[in-house]
Every structure is written in structure tokens, then in C-alpha cells.
Amino acid sequence: MKRSAWLAAVALMATACGTTVSPSAVTSGRAPNAAASPDGALVAPGPFGQSAPGAIGGQLPTGASLPGQASGPAGTTSEGGQAAAGSGRGAGPVQLGIEYFDSSQAVQSGQAAGYTVSPGDPYSEAKALVAWVNQHGGLGGHRVEPVYFQFSTTGPEDTQEQSACQTWTQDHHAVAVIWPNNFSSSDLLPNCLARAGVMLTGGADSYLNSPQLSALRGYLQTAYMFAGDRMYQRLIDRLVATHWFTPGGKVAVLSDDGATYAANVHTVDQTLARYGLTAVDHATLSTTSPGQDPADCQSAGLRFAADHVTNVVVVDDGARAFLYCSPIFRSQSYFPKFSITSYDSPSTVQTLIPASSLSGSAGIGWEPVNDVNPATLNNSGTLCVSIMRAAGLNITASAFTEAIAFAYCDAFFFLHRAYSTVPTLAAAGVQAAVAGLGTSYLSPITLRTRFEPGRYDGAAATADLQYQTSCRCYRYSGAASSVS
């Protein structure tokens, strides 16, 4: 079971409670009160769908910019036509697949597990961004018609991904898909869309490694994604450089099971070996039976304590070690130091986990909105807040809410930029445009980005991250540095 870092706090707890829903309840793909356009596309009601772009403001605030952004009037469209993927600029509307989750379901799931979460309103956030894109040239001059898919935080992932892919590639013909959530452990969705020639951005903390991304042939590209092999090598390098490993102590690895995580654990072990370090134990959390988390954590804690493990390198899915294992370790009076990354959403973890379990935690961060609260916003982040505020949405109410909204903003900004210079909407042209971005794309989420031929994960810089007991919060230590 996999979720993005910002959704892990809800989804993991919900599945642990054993909540289930029938496939028919989670795979319809129809947004609340959605209306069908003349060609049958599922679009949001009112000005975000069939009619002209709405009145939501999206002008750049003073000093803000998106490098290389196309400007000008929204493309004129024929209401009944669906533009073909290879058509010329401004030839008609195009369909864009957009995934969102039921925020009320997320709140209820969190409450059932004893946590209070504020996920905001992802559906309304996506609508506001559709309006902004349409007011600023659409995708390559084509007005966007959204095709929404509601994802259940408690439903079967593969079933939903298969239904979503069918919705966007067979029932409709999306040129691209925005999926801020994580992918299932089988990575069904990115493979399905790649086979259909549909561009995809999102995926959050999917932990895909560089070979897996390469196998998708450029159909999945995300500005804030950090390939697992590069990320875990960087993590160990920085933990050694900052003297995090306890002198004379022992190291263990706590990971999710499955092939992708096993490959990342291998990277951890190899990098540790370069520094003369060896993990004395490896424990796993089940990705197929999340209800096993308490038992898995109980076993891991007893083993690690018996082995006198002082430092636990975490290779898990969106804060599972913190949400499940740290409370159990605490009940065992066992307090090792945990590693942490942006994929664990430190700014949310610090509000849920007692300081006693986070003391000594350190790692790397590349997503300020997920790492520290309050986060310093760049121009793209400021623009995201501005768009949401104009739509009557307060996304800065909590770090959790802000992180979700920023994931949507990044996806829309990234696609808007990628399609801004291509003569047609053909995937090959868009992929070439992304490869040519270099370091110019300014993401609202990550510190710096870099794209080039053969590199599909955009994260290009990290900062050292440490838990500080004085404020009971995570803070960056030192300046960010580039990642090769």
C-alpha cells in the first residue's frame, strides 16, 4: 500500500482501521455535481467546464513569475470538439485527467484513528487551477476540459488505478494526467498511461528508482520527485557528513517490503558500506497487509532494542515508521534516532508525534512546504496561494492543507510550462520540451529543479534537516546544495 507523504497520515490510518468500500463506489470517476460536456467529457460545473473561463483571479503577484511561462489570451475553442493529441496550437479544447480524493472521507478516517487532519478541498483547488490555466493560454493554446477521478483513501488501489486509466484513455482521451497521490505498489497507473501514450505528472513519494523511470520512456515526469536510488544515496552521504550516526552505535534499516523498496534498501546498504558501516538488522512493514503494521513494528522494536540499535534508517512509505512504529517503540521504552526525508512530511509529523520519539531525528529535505512550518515561499508558491485565495480557499491554514494544494499547483504549473512552447500536443514534443528545461522551471514545492534528456525526476537540491527539541519542530541546517 502506498500513498503520498501528505496523504499517508490519513490513508495509512484509515486502512489500518479495516475500512473498505466497494469498487463501484470508488471508480465512477465523476466529480461532485459534474456535468457532461457536449462530447461527453466529465467536467466541473459552471465556468470551469463547458462555458468560458470563470472569474477567478490568477494574475501574478508583484515580483512573481514562472520562468518561460507563455502568456496571452486563452485559446479559442469549439464547444463540441475534442482536439486530437497531434493537432496544432489553439485547434480546440483538450481533456486533462485530474485525480483528487474525498476530503471529508479523509477527515473521518483520521478521526477514527485518533488524529485531527485538515486536508483542505482538493477538488475546489483543482477547479481553481483549471480556471487559471485557461485564463493563461491553456495547454499550448488549447482550453482545458477537466476529466476528474475521485480516489478513495480506503479503497483498493489497483482497482482504482485501472478504472482511472480506462476513464482517461478509453472513455475519454486525455492528453495528460495530474495524479498528486502516490501509485499502487504495482505502479499500474504510470505503466498503463505510458502504454497509451499519455503524459503523467505527480506520483509524489512513489520511490521509483531511475531505471524504473527510464522504463516509462518520459511519460512520467515530476518536478519534485526524487528517484529512490539517488535520494537514498544522498541521505546516507549527508547523515555521515553531519555526524548523525552514533559513535560506537549500531544501525538498522526499517523499510516497506516489495521490489522497489528492496532496491532502495540495497542502495542504503551499498552507501553505508562505502563509509565502513553495516546495518545489523533489517525489518519490513507489509505493503499488502497494512493492518499488520502494529505487529510488524512490535517485532522490529524488540529486535532492534535487543541488537542495541541506536540509529534507524527509514525506507518506508510516507511516515509509516513515525506514525506506527515510534509509538510502539516508545511503549517499549526504546528511543532510537530515525532518519527522515521530505517524503515523510516532517512538518506534519512534528504535529502528530511526541518530541521524545523525534529527538535526534535528522535527514534531508527538498520540499520546504513539507519540511518546515512556516515555509518560505518562492514566487511560484506565492502564486499558488494567490490563486487559491482568489477562489476563496485558505490553503495556509495548516502545513497539511498547504502541501496538498502545492502538489496540485506544481502539476498545473509544470504542464502549463511544458506545453507552452510546443507546436503540437504530441507527447514526443512535450517530452523534448521538458528535457530542454534544464534548471529553469520554478516549482512551488521543491528547492531547485533540473531536467535533461534521460532525467525524469526534477528534484535537484537538498538541505540538511534536523529535529530541534527547543521548538519541537524540524528546521534546515545550513544552505541547500545541488544534487548530481
Image (tube, grey):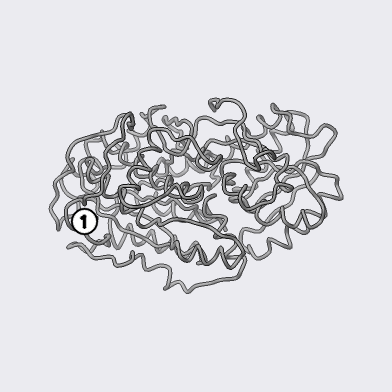
Give the camera-side residue of 388 and 343.
388
From the image, tell me which residue sits under label 1. Answer: 47
Position of 94 with respect to 368 (left or right) is left
Give the camera-side residue of 199 and 389.
389
Residue 403 lies, in percent from the top left, at: 47, 47
Q: Amino acid at mark 1?
A: Pro
Q: Residue at x 36, y 51 (%)?
A: 177
Position of 391 with respect to 12 (left or right) is left
Give the camera-side residue of 466 and 413.
466
Residue 413 lies, in percent from the top left, at: 34, 40
Q: Residue at x 60, y 26 (%)?
A: 478
Above or below, 63 relative to 22? above
Write down the quadrant of residue 18 in the picture.
bottom right
Write down the quadrant of residue 331 in the picture.
bottom right
Position of 327 with respect to 118 (left or right) is right
Task: Label 1, secondary structure: give it.
Answer: helix
Residue 397 lies, in percent from the top left, at: 46, 50
Q: Residue at x 42, y 41 (%)?
A: 221
Query: Which image quarter holds the N terminus?
Result: bottom right
Residue 372 lies, in percent from the top left, at: 56, 39
Above or below, 421 relative to 40? above
Q: Residues within 10 Å of mark 1 (few under 14, many from 20)?
A: some
Write down the quadrant of residue 265 in the picture.
top right
Query: Which image quarter holds the C terminus?
Result: top right
Q: Residue at x 71, y 48 (%)?
A: 254
Number of marks drawn: 1
